[in-house]
Image (spheres, rainbow, N blue to C red):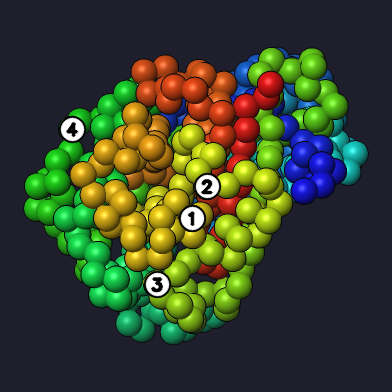
Amino acid sequence: MGTDLLERRAVISGVGQSAIGRRVERSGLQLTLDAVLAAVEDAGLTLDDIDGLAMFPGGGAANLPGYANGNLYEVQDALRITTTWRQGIIEGMALPFYGPAMAVATGQARHVVVWRTVKEGSAARAAGGRPAYGAGKPVAEGPLAWLLPIGMLSPVCQVAPYAARYMHEYGVTREQLAWIPVTQRAHAALNPDAVYRSALTVDDYLAARMISTPMCLYDCDVPADGATAIVVSAAGTAPALRAPVRIEAMAGVVEGRPSWEQWEDMGRVGHGAARAMWARTGLRPGDVDVAQLYDGFTIEAVWWLEAMGFCGTGEAGAFVEGGERIALDGELPLNTWGGQLSGGRLHAAFGHTAEAVRQLRGEAGARQVRGAEVAAVTNVGGLEAGAALLTRWN
């Protein structure tokens, strides 16, 4: 394995978050600035050191209610940053740090901040409790021309048939899958920033209202308000950074048609990205100490467990059953901050990346996994799949 891979020329140097909650009385721009300033300080840098900016999604308030970023112009102006590189990332990026890593690895910048801000909790409340994406008036064109007439607007409705197919094909039960949200809620209880921290049981899960069969309320991530920022720096600057984390390997592969309704294999998602990532490192699944796997819905974490090789295809139900293997002291601690199912929908693996960095640094407090040296991070699945390994800086 070569040592000059692009990602080896970059490190994650800082992570920062704003206040996070179901409803936070600050604007999207204010939340963004809070997170950016926290991330820069966490890296041991100043704003004068920052010469690159990136954001997700690329259009500021963008195309959906609750997508609430301050845009590049507002943030750059508010913080008086001089840039040599900028990027407005849209849907389809593999990982939050993918573009910034390329920028610093190729010398276009030395320290890049990338952020994601959501006000989906506030947007849902403003819509009378409906999901934020249901607050507008959708038009039946593009992919929606096929989805809207059958009421398939919500992502939960788009993913549910995949969950049903997977469970039918491999005999996985809801009683088994319940252990993912139940265990992640136990982790969230140790995270003071998590949206939901009260105990959750398998019986609670099974009694919850169905949202889109077979997925119930606790299979869905939690709409929230909050911002996460990540600083990506050139590896050569590491001696001056507070606590950098290595990017061991990263990849993003879409191996089928880029739409949920046209995906060919409804039981397998993310395998292409995982294969490509493992091909870029000598590490293997057994080397991973902690896994931050995208969990917009429970089934996505299931797919990633299998795609990443932590268990075989169709074996995730048995792997998570009982919760012992994915607990903080288990063989593969999963989504140790509570994930999006309890910690809040911070989206696009931003929350997952921030937690991976804290775990590798030994800065996760009561939920710290002892001796964590290798962390897996994944983003979405299928049509926007990204996978990475982060490692402790030694």
Q: Residues within 10 Å of mark 4 (few under 14, many from 20)?
A: some
Residue beneath disc 3 = 267
Residue beneath disc 4 = 199
The three-letter code of the residue at mark 4 reads Ala
Q: Position of residue 288 (x, y in %)?
A: 52, 39
Measure the alpha-carbon separation of dots 1 and 3.
Answer: 15 Å
From the viewer's perspective, is the residue at label 2 or at label 3 nearer? 2
Residue 198, above or below 128? above
Question: Which of the two labelled residues, at mark 1 and mark 3, occupies the earlier sequence position?
Answer: 3
Q: Residues within 10 Å of mark 2 (few under 14, many from 20)?
A: some
The three-letter code of the residue at mark 1 reads Gly
The three-letter code of the residue at mark 2 reads Pro
Q: Secondary structure at mark 4?
A: loop
Residue under the point 72% across and 32% down: 11
Tell me if residue 388 can be seen. yes
Tag 2 and tag 4, C-beta contact below 8 Å: no
Give the label on residue 309, or none.
1
Q: Position of residue 345 (x, y in %)?
A: 41, 44
Q: Secondary structure at mark 1?
A: loop
Q: Position of residue 188 (x, y in %)?
A: 32, 31
Question: Which of the two labelled residues, at mark 4 and mark 3, occupies the earlier sequence position?
Answer: 4
